[in-house]
Image (spheres, rainbow, N blue to C red):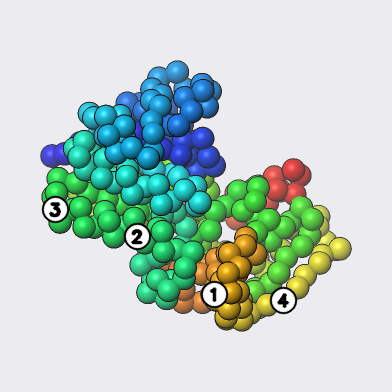
Amino acid sequence: MTTIKNVAVVGATGKIGRPIVERLSTSKLFNVTVLTRDDSRGRDFPADVTIKQVDYDSIESLQSALQGQDALVSAMAFEAIHEQKNLVDAAVNAGVKRMIPSEYGNDLMNPKLAAFPIYQPKIAIRQQCEKRVTENPSFSWTTIHNASFLGPDWTLDFIVDVKNRKADIKDGGDVLFCATTYDDIAQAVIGILTHLEETANRPVRISSVNTTQNELIAIAKELGATDGWDLTYSETENLESEAFRRWAAGDHSEEVIAMFINRAFIGKGWGGYFPVRDNELLGIKDLGRDELKSIIKSAMDR
């Protein structure tokens, strides 16, 4: 039976990558190596984490760093997704058994999302992984679909800004979507690497909680944010149309990207809600309402 012992992580200093490194390290199940352009950025990782400086533009550099690694976990930022192309080829060449590419977020297996230009880089990397599996059966991949991110930071601001009591309510505000903490994403990585056969060459779908915009506002009001709300209303179908129009005209701004994302995770029947999840397999426990209230309270108190 194939087992994973040596794990390399890229994008390790970000909001997704850092919890992954910390959870891999504290589990005591793996030897963890962080690959980075700038090795000085890894000085505050746990003492047992190895830091290797690499050149992402060089397959040879990456392949050398990945020699002896059983798994590669990517947490590369949205704007750097395309840089995984060399990582995939280097991982295969180095004999890596499992790669988790950076495809966190919406369920990109949903065919509705395949037409969205913002997701093309992620889809291209997954397709590259699929192709390399057919050529090298010892290589495999898993992607993590967690829909929205849940934490007292940009995440809640994007959905409902509970601190400033502001939100754009989409499609009425009662559309159920999945939201996942960074810690549970890290737990999903552990679960994948300890359940290789069950997770091979497929996405896993996870969430910490299923909620709605209106529920988040209701909880914030329970916690004392009773008045002064600035609420606007929109339909994600209209956001989608506007996003495509502006993108075609050359507007690739954050505002336009947000329109696509909102359609993707709040539009009913799109990629933001998973009726079937892999939580139990991967060791993820659903958050209770009190735990969700605690996260919202932290966001309000920032």
- Name the residue: 32% across, 43% down: 87
Q: Residues within 10 Å of mark 4 (few under 14, many from 20)?
A: few
Counting residues from the N terminus, which is met first, the one under dot 2 or under dot 1? 2
- Name the residue: 86% across, 63% down: 228
Counting residues from the N terminus, which is met first, the one under dot 2 or under dot 4? 2
Q: Is residue 299 left or right of residue 203?
A: right
Counting residues from the N terminus, which is met first, the one under dot 3 or under dot 2? 2
Distance (Cα) linking label 3 and label 2 = 17 Å
- Kindly report which numbered mark, 2 or 4, lies closer to the viewer in this rendering: 2
Q: Is residue 119 left or right of residue 293?
A: left
Q: Amino acid at mark 3?
A: Glu
Q: Residues within 10 Å of mark 3 (few under 14, many from 20)?
A: few
- Kindly report which numbered mark, 2 or 1, lies closer to the viewer in this rendering: 1
Which mark identifies residue 233? 4
Question: Which residue position holds label 3?
Answer: 135
Counting residues from the N terminus, which is met first, the one under dot 1 or under dot 3? 3
Q: Amino acid at mark 1?
A: Ala
Which mark identifies residue 124? 2
Marks 3/2 in contact by CB < 8 Å: the verdict is no
Residue 233 percent across, percent down from the top left: 72, 76
- Kindly report which numbered mark, 1 or 4, lies closer to the viewer in this rendering: 1
Q: Is residue 239 above or below residue 38?
A: below
Distance (Cα) linking label 1 and label 3 = 36 Å
Q: Secondary structure at mark 2?
A: helix
